[in-house]
Image: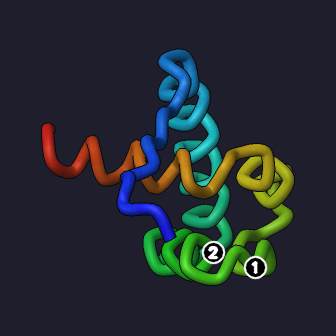
Amino acid sequence: MEDNTIKFVVPEDASAEMKAILSAVYAALNEKGYNPINQIVGYLLSEDPTYITNYNNARSLICKLDRDELLQELVRHYLFH
């Protein structure tokens, strides 16, 4: 096993697309009466898309995102905003 740390890099232009998709998924979950935060966290932890409703194409939208990149962007936003 190497002692070197692997560097993970998210493309610069990915942030705007992630925000748009996450906002649309949040809105769809909210409109259907789910707790959007709980459902999105469930998806992120399990990678099981059934946590996300099919309403307004939300499930297929969130599946377009790379989960690791999304988690990195969420952590960055939490720490710096």
Kindly identify the amino acid type of the residue bearing the numbered disc 1.
Asp
User: What's the CA distance linking mark 1 and mark 2?
Assistant: 5 Å
Residue, x 75% and y 79% (percent of image)? 48
- The answer to the question of whether label 1 and label 2 lie on touching residues, with beta carbons closer than 8 A, is yes
Q: Residues within 10 Å of mark 2 (few under 14, many from 20)?
A: some
Q: Secondary structure at mark 1?
A: loop
N-terminal label among 1 and 2: 2
Residue 47 position, x and y percent, is: 70, 74
Residue annotated with mark 2: 43
Q: Nearer the viewer, residue 55 or 78?
A: 78
- Label 1: few (<14), some (14–19) or many (≥20) C-alpha neighbours in 10 Å: few
Q: From the viewer's perspective, tell me whether residue 27 is left or right of residue 47.
A: left
Nearer to me, 21 or 8: 8
Callout 2: SS: helix
Q: Looking at the image, which residue is at 80% across and 79% down?
A: 50
Q: Which quarter of the figure has residue 20?
A: top right
34 vs 19: above or below = below
User: Which residue shows up at 79% across the image and 54% down it?
Assistant: 63
Residue in view at x 55 percent, y 24 percent: 11
Where residue 53 appears, x then y in whole percent? Answer: 77, 69
Disc 2 marks a residue whose amino acid type is Tyr
User: In this picture, is 57 found above or below 46?
Assistant: above
Query: What is the quadrant of the C terminus in the image?
Result: top left
Q: Is residue 56 left or right of residue 33?
A: right
Residue picked out by circle 1: 48
Point out which mark residue 36 bears: none
